[in-house]
Image: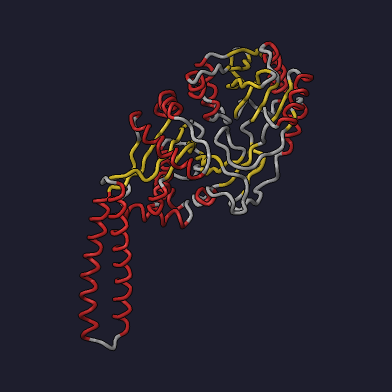
Amino acid sequence: MTLHFTELSPDEYGHFEAQHILGTYTQSIAQYNLLVARGYKPFLLGVKDNEVVVAAALVMTEMTRLGPVFLFDRGPLLDFDNTMLLAFFVREVRKFARNHKVLYIQWEPNVTYVKTDNKGNLIKAPNDGFLKLMAARGFKHQPFEFGMSTTGSPTWEYTKDLSNLTDKDSINQSYGKNVQYYLKKNRQFGIKLRELTREDLPDFKALTQKTADRLNYHDKDLAFYNTVYDTYGEDATFVFAELNFETYIAEENQKISALNQKLAKIQLKIDKYPTQDKFKRQFQEFDDQKQHHITRVNKATQQMRTAGQKEVVVAGALFIEQPQEMTYLYSGTYETYMDYYAPYQIQDKMIQKAVSHGLKNYNFYGISGRFNGSDGVLGFKTAFEGEARQLAGSFILPVKPMKYKVYRLLKKITGRK
């Protein structure tokens, strides 16, 4: 084995990442282009064995008060079981970092620590061997974090295995009963999905900002969404779920008319057989259905009047496609229209797209890692029947040990980076 550490060309890196089992959008060449477009100076580092790339990483530089930091977001991409390759990569990256006056290196590898079911019960034993492997290379594991974040990759995520799904029917059967029910309602409501153009992105930003304000988190700016659209191209899907009030109201009124005809026929039977309670029960059942549809019409009519337009956006989301998986990244739902269950239809459409493209994994992305009912998004994601995954976490390798100790002391005192 003749190993050579080098900076890779975008073509070399992109080809390697697209085929690597640990590849993810945060380590993709599109993400590299996005960072460059947003003014960062990332590196594409790699190791070659006889001119064949065997390890690689997209490295982003972040600044602290005492110097720059090299951040490997879901990287590096290498065979961690190959201890010789791992040792070589760590040693050479540290040299490279020292030449760039880096304070410390932070790895957040795309490696699973634990997997759980929907209730948080372990599916298999924790991957403590990986923590020991990293410690042997000089890395210090940071305490595991829980909770949601919009500023970095989540430490917990929810995924669905698509390996055994082949068509729309198998996909639908793989969902929980609630999702199947909501998708049936979506068809009744006539919700339509539309992929967005670049000109639609201000409306997408308005949706995500409204959601962020309601849930009290920081949203990405419009420039970010524009850059994602430009750099990811066809691998980025921005989608809206839309409701046409007039169409919806007309369909509901047709159902009311059909029920009126049934009620009239049953009333004739009641008049003819007044002692037959079964006809009265039938009348009550159909009348309850009618009142339900009337309520929908009245509500939609008021919503259309308030909106001042015939068609509205109900919900929307952004997805990134990789050869390894489809990732559900950012989304929003207008609170007024939550009763139309549009997010379920969006997810179903994108899961179908992932299966049709031969992808084996669907990543619902971040969850808090808490299964006590405090995570508002967990119930939505688990309804699609997957599993929770806690990543191995964050690992620090000081490049300037003494200066890093000072940095840690200052951080402890001030509580800031």
Q: Is residue 253 left or right of residue 322?
A: left
Q: 186 above or below 139?
A: below
Q: Residue lying at the far top in this picture: please name it.
A: 99
Image quadrant containing the C terminus: top right
Question: Measured from the top left, where is residue 82 in percent x and y?
Answer: 69, 26
Q: Position of residue 19 (x, y in %)?
A: 53, 26
Relative to 379, say whether 113 is above or below.
Answer: above
Observer able to see residue 127:
yes
Q: Is residue 345 above or below residue 64?
A: below
Q: Position of residue 141 (x, y in %)?
A: 73, 32
Residue 157 or 56: which is nearer the viewer?
A: 157
The tally of labels here is 0
Question: Extreme bottom residue here?
Answer: 275
Expressed as whole percent of the image width and height from the top left, the position of residue 324 reads 51, 33
Location of residue 291 (image quadrant): bottom left
Looking at this view, is 171 or 65 the one in front? 65
